[in-house]
Image (cartoon, helix red, strand yellow):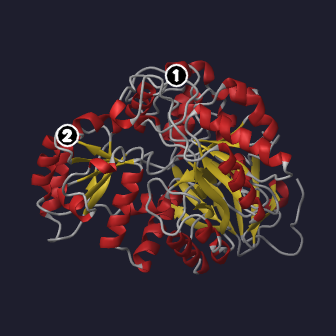
Amino acid sequence: MKSSAAHGVADVVVRGPIHTMADGDDVPHTAAAVRGGEFVAMDAEAESLIGPETHVLITPPGACVMPGLGDIHTHLELAGGSLFDRVQLDPAAGVDEMIERISEAAQRTPEGEWIVGGLWGVGLLEELDSLETRARIDAATAEHPLLLRDETAHHRLVNSATLRLMGLGGDASSWAPDVSIDSLSGRATGVLVESGSRRAEECLERERPRTDTELRDVMRAATTVLSSVGVTMTQEAATGERALAALAALDRTDDLGCWITTSASVNDLIFGFTPVGERLLDRVAEYATPRVRPTYAKIFLDGTPPTFTASFHDPYPASFAPEHGRGPDFRGTTTMPLARLVEWLCQLHARGLGAKVHCTGDASVTMVLDAVDAARERGVVLPVQLAHAQFIASTDYARLAEADIPVDICPQLWYPSTFQRAAVAMVPVSVRATMCAFREQLDAGVRLVGGSDWPVSPSPNPWPAIHGLVTRAHPEGTFPGVFLPEQAVGVREAVAMFTRECARAMGIAAHTGTIEVGKSADFVVIDRDPFAIAATRLGGTRTLQTWMGGRPRFAA
């Protein structure tokens, strides 16, 4: 390792064991020295830089030091906002418990104010999708407008008060399939799908807009949670202009606890951002700060399996619904044709931006690869990430490796859970045996990057995800069994997905992601050494301290 230790003592020396996670550096180090916010020396040389004012940080017995962790896919405005929501739901809860939580929230909510919350389980869709359930919810909300998000973030549940504000108090048949309709009366049941969800969010923003101060508080709360679980870098996966402004404002006042790469929305299925597309892209550079990097744009290419909007090569099971244009051979759709996707890639390249493409189904993954090939034939090469690509045709592995496209794996479908069970039930039978085939993909040279999709995953803590990648079992043992255990990866491979590979995909590997001389002193102290314990203990790993740029951001 190189040294930049000359000229002065260290501000901080942290004593190991220290896992740098640098490629090829698998031996623990004993010490790292920090000066001016950067690592300046390692091991004995680091010890030699201790002076009378140096803070010496000694890790507790059994603990270790690692680089700050990363998360390639978060929704900070949604996640931070959920911390202030009036209804906090467990996705495993049933409808009766949901209605009880709504009623409790209504009793403590001032008259006329909204009740906002989540996350309800997508497995409840059938039971919620009825006028009878809507009537129960109306009784519980006592005329407060209601908006509840589901665990996929692609559905919303609203009550009659919200439907009236949206202009859907009567016959809503023309809004199908984005608004679920009672077939006999033509009235909305209150279940909204994708574009319907976006319209509900637009209504909420119109009727109860957050102030700039409130939005900064939301973003600060989200990044504080990230610090508490050791995350010092994240990619905000779909970013509106107000969120960009809030993040930039926090960084300018040194109140942002992590590196953030943003993904300005090209199109918007579910969030209700204004503006999107070219109007937003024209302005993103205004919000660049030292740690806020507005260098990506987000393209929604398809949706999700539970809404039948993910695009697959093979037909969906049990998808016959002729009133919505779906037949027994329905395979989902994309939001744009191949030619339009190629044009967007070319435009983003001209703007100096990368593309983060939401492509849940295997057919949409193939389309992205086709678009990348077509763009390169025009001499256009830009950074591209695949978001949520956990259903990938094996014939595309070699193409992904050759194109050097990182695959953003989230949410956590690689171990048994209620969410995974619902996802598996909805996807084509042909892809169930190959979903989350991470061992095969790594062996084929595919770049995998760890993410949470927080708040779709209830926590951004990487350690339960790492546990599941290594064991393919639920990290808390709540659900029995293992999922495709032959696709498990090694501990070091899993940790790399949440450290150096994340930094590399975000475009900040020159600054962070590993503990190396010259890089930002971003590191965590955790209560156990992941390379020295049984894999079954990985999920319980606790963050003791989080440091960012040589300064403490969290202490347990």
Q: Amino acid at mark 1?
A: Arg
Label 1: which residue?
432
Q: Residue 55 placed where, x, y %? A: 67, 69
Residue drawn at x 44%, y 54% is: 270
Mark 1 lies on a secondary structure that is: helix
Label 2: which residue?
130
Q: Is residue 454 above or below residue 530?
A: below
Q: Is residue 393 above or below residue 188?
A: above
Q: Residue 433 placed where, x, y %? A: 55, 19
Residue drawn at x 65%, y 26% is: 393
Q: Is residue 351 above or below residue 440?
A: below
Residue drawn at x 57%, y 67% is: 257
Residue drawn at x 89%, y 61% is: 3
Q: Is residue 506 above or below residue 277?
A: above
Mark 2 lies on a secondary structure that is: loop
Q: Amino acid at mark 2?
A: Ser
Q: Is residue 493 left or right of residue 216?
A: right
Q: Residue 235 placed where, x, y %? A: 60, 56
CB under 8 Å between discs 2 and 1: no
